[in-house]
Amino acid sequence: MPQPKERVIALIDMDAFFASIEQRDNPALRGKPLFIAGSHTKKGVVTTCSYEARKYGCHSGMPVIEAWRRCPHGLFFPGSQGKYSYASMRILQICKRFTPVVEPFSIDEMFLDVSGCLRLFGSKRVIGEGIRGAVRDELDLPSSVGIAPNKLLAKLASKLAKPDGVYIIEPEDVSALMEDLPVESLFGVGEKTAEKLKLLGIHTAGQLGRYPADILSRKFGVGGCKLHRMGLGQDDSPVVAEAESERPKSISNETTFYSATNNPEHLLKVLLSLVHKVAFRLRKHDARARTVRLTVRTEDFVTHTHRHTLRHTIFFDTDLYDEICALFREVDTGALRIRLLGVGVSNLVFDEEPSQLRLFEDFDNRDVLTARAVDSIKKRFGESAIKIGDSRQTF
Ligand SMILES: [Mg+2]
């Protein structure tokens, strides 16, 4: 019997991407604590900061006001999205020289499935150093590359590779590595999940992997099984190459409730999180939507769909949320509780030219910058990292 082929997944993650680009282009900024933040107001959030700024305990996702408090002599820049997108596109092109299976995961992270080209290049290290070296030589930017048997571990390896290095996790090293790894270091385990796990006495990935999967399933629902596998360092999700021609007709996300509910606050929160997901995917495809759809399934399993077609197109979370809330106000389920909510968009319009550059002309620069910055933070820290302020949830 032929042995199943070893999966080899690489993740290139740029080091302090936006800040590194600014430092590359302006020598006066090199060696300085530099912050890229979409907005300088109190509500603004740091998108990226240079390694010099990290010495002061600053990090991406931190409120600008807090970063400024910790590092008062820091230099704050709004950033230049067009430049970042261009660099991102160049990185993608470099990755595609190594394998056609490249998944741009965020503006500064790309997964590569290099299983098929390992023999061609000779070794994992050659591939890792090759990608990093090409990005360094051609773009003059630092990056880190993680190589591992799957995406979960490649993500972890890229963190271990930082800054400016290559880290390889061999299949035989996985169980030892998992043993003492804090659960929150597993990509996809957020703060809340980590807290819940700790209540069960699970602090490390090793403990998570040994914990009975059926109890995890009872506590975490469908996610329980996935958590168990994460604890074992297992993940079979594929690297999905996004072909440029791949254009969806519609985009939607839905949530089924464990128990039916009529709690408006909860329902609006769920709608908001669905809106975030849909708008994020919309922007990922450089698309804008003309038709907005709300799906509501009641506890009697009847599905109600409400649609609205707009004269203009939308792609910001706030605009989509406003439309969805307007549709939600029309919903009349009587005394029946709600079992499922879905948010969808269709009638999509695609931007033909390299998106961000063109978007600059059409939309308020700062809004686009903020939306994209939020997207990249979400990809790094998970969906819950940033939400529209709570004030928008009043209904
Ligand atoms: Mg990065």
Image: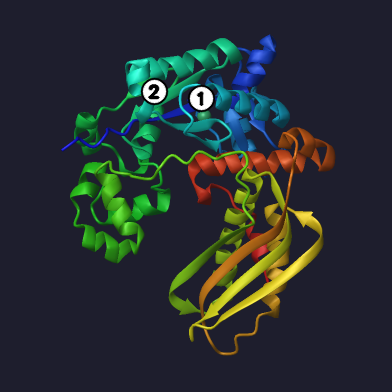
Mark 2: C-beta under 8 Å from nearest atom of ligand 1: no
Cα–Cα gap, marks 2 and 1: 18 Å
Q: Quadrant of residue 75?
A: top right
Residue for badge 1: 95
Query: Looking at the rendering, in which quadrant would you find the N terminus?
Result: top left
Q: Position of residue 394 (x, y in %)?
A: 67, 68
Other-residue count near label 2 (Cα within 10 Å), few / some / many at <14 / 14–19 / ≥20: many
Q: Secondary structure at mark 1?
A: helix
Whether residues under marks 2 and 1 lie with C-beta atoms below 8 angstroms apart, the answer is no
Q: Residue at x 34, y 35 (%)?
A: 153
Other-residue count near label 1 (Cα within 10 Å), few / some / many at <14 / 14–19 / ≥20: many
Residue for badge 2: 161
Q: Position of residue 390 (x, y in %)?
A: 63, 59
Count of numbered labels shown in the rendering: 2
Q: Secondary structure at mark 2?
A: helix
Say whether residue 350 is left or right of residue 125.
right
Say whether residue 298 is left or right of residue 47.
left
Say whether residue 48 is left or right of residue 149.
right
Q: Residue at x 36, y 28 (%)?
A: 116
Vertical side of 245 occupied by 173: above or below: above
Q: Amino acid at mark 1?
A: Cys
Q: Residue at x 38, y 38 (%)?
A: 151
Q: Position of residue 341 (x, y in %)?
A: 55, 71
Closer to the N terminus: mark 2 or mark 1? Answer: 1
